[in-house]
Image (cartoon, rainbow, N blue to C red):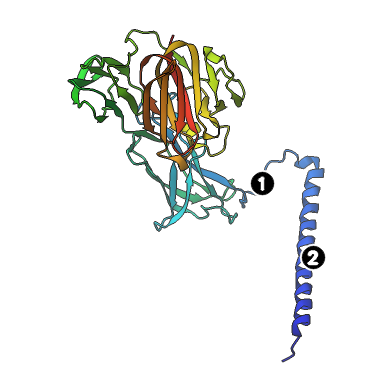
Amino acid sequence: MFDLGPVGILLATIVVLAAAAALFWLLWQRRSRRKGRRLTNPADDYAVRSDWSGSSGTLNYSSFVYFDVDRDGKYGVGDRPMAGIMVRLYDEAGKLAASARTNNAGFANFPMSVKRRKAVIRVPGNWRFAVSVPPGWQAKSENDIQTRHLLSLPGSPAGLVSHGMLQPVGLAPLRRLGGRVAGEGSVTLSVMRNGHVLETRPLAPGAAFSVDLADDADTVLVSGGGLERGLALSPYPADLGLLSAQTACIASDAALETIDFDDVTSRTFRKIPSGHAGLAWRNLNAMARDYTKDSQGYVNGNVSGDHVVYTSSGLPAEFSCEQPFGFHSVMLSAAWLKSEGEVALIESWLGEQLISSDQVMLSALTPLHYAPMLKAVTRVRLSTKHYWQMVLDDLVLTR
């Protein structure tokens, strides 16, 4: 057999590659000329399509996930898209085909095409979409697993169609109230709905507590031991911090003022200037919820409007005022799923005296309604144990 040797093999390889490149160039030129002829013919500018035999495009077949704020299992005007929720796609044989997390708009996208190799849905059949429900959460819409039958349809954008789109999937965390009781004495927690008591529980002095709440509970009341206070519940988990008779609590009839941060800027981003809402601000930035790509906590931590506030670079931050004000509550979240379970430290001062110090666990999936209800503070300091960014929304004060 004739031996070309290394030089001959190299030359043969070069010849083959050159021939392939030349063929590709000729085909590209032919395609370009054909496309050019269409573009130069005015009759093709708005031509009615006559050949419906092929499909070469790609579409996203999407699963939409939302935070079911009112927990009714239906996507409504008060519900909010969720970012970072994992959705898995299985083919007709039950084999995992792909997985994707929901984006800032709440959509987990799966490319579909009969022609494009990068598409994950390429053939007809039954395809199953499974939303991964986070631990301690519920799918209130009861449709976290859905199957759609895809049919071949030449001429359609992707070559595949279904008779109906996936239904929105509504998630909600179990409602839970936490806190700690200082000192001694008999303390009772009452869970209310429309002014009626659903249940009462004793709270052990000198201990932390965690209470699961009914979906329809709207208020909790603490009584006894000089700790009297009440909190109107939000759709989110709540923490009352340290309950101490040594710290004055905001009166139940006090007028509450909510700072939602939507008036810091009409644009996407701005460092909060001192004087905003009558407070001094340090190391806190206001940002549109979807300003940063794949920013799960910035999206999920937004409870009203379109803007949130976060601790810049994860470093400690403060808001303060020379004149004492009441610190009622704030919504707190972790900025990223990579920081799920980050611990936040919230320290409240009256002049030079530290009057409250609480540690709470943060999530990038849902805000925590932190409600210390302190009657008079002049400075609040926010920090995290591992220096991940903390997200704030709906700061509630009294003046």
- Judged left or right of residue 242, residue 8 is right
Camera-side mark, 2 or 1? 2
Q: Which residue is at a point 52% across and 20% down the rendered structure image?
A: 261
Q: Which residue is outermost to the bottom?
A: 1
Mark 1 crowd level (few <14, some 14–19, many ≥20, 10 Å Cα): few
Disc 1 on helix, strand or loop? loop
The kind of residue tagged 1 is: Ser
Of residues 115 and 275, the one nearer the viewer is 275
Q: Relative to the observer, which residue lies in front, 209 or 166?
A: 209
Q: Residue at x 46, y 39 (%)?
A: 386
Which residue was labeled with disc 2? 22
Precedes in sequence: disc 2 or disc 1: 2
Q: Quadrant of residue 141?
A: top left
In the rendered image, residue 49, in percent from the top left (x then y), is placed at 67, 44
Q: Is residue 49 visible?
A: yes
301 is higher (above) or lower (below) than 92: above
Horizontal and vertical percent for residue 259? 48, 17
At a point 54% along the width and 23% down the height, the residue shown is 282
Quadrant location, the C terminus? top left
x, y (%) of residue 252?
Answer: 32, 10
Q: From the top left corner, tell me how far across and down residue 256 is, in percent.
A: 41, 11
Residue at 77%, 65% (x, y): give it. 21
At label 2, counting other C-alpha atoms closer than 10 Å, the crowd grade (few under 14, some 14-19, many 20 or more) is few
Count the numbered circles shown: 2
Q: Which mark is residue 50?
A: 1
Amino acid identity at mark 2: Ala
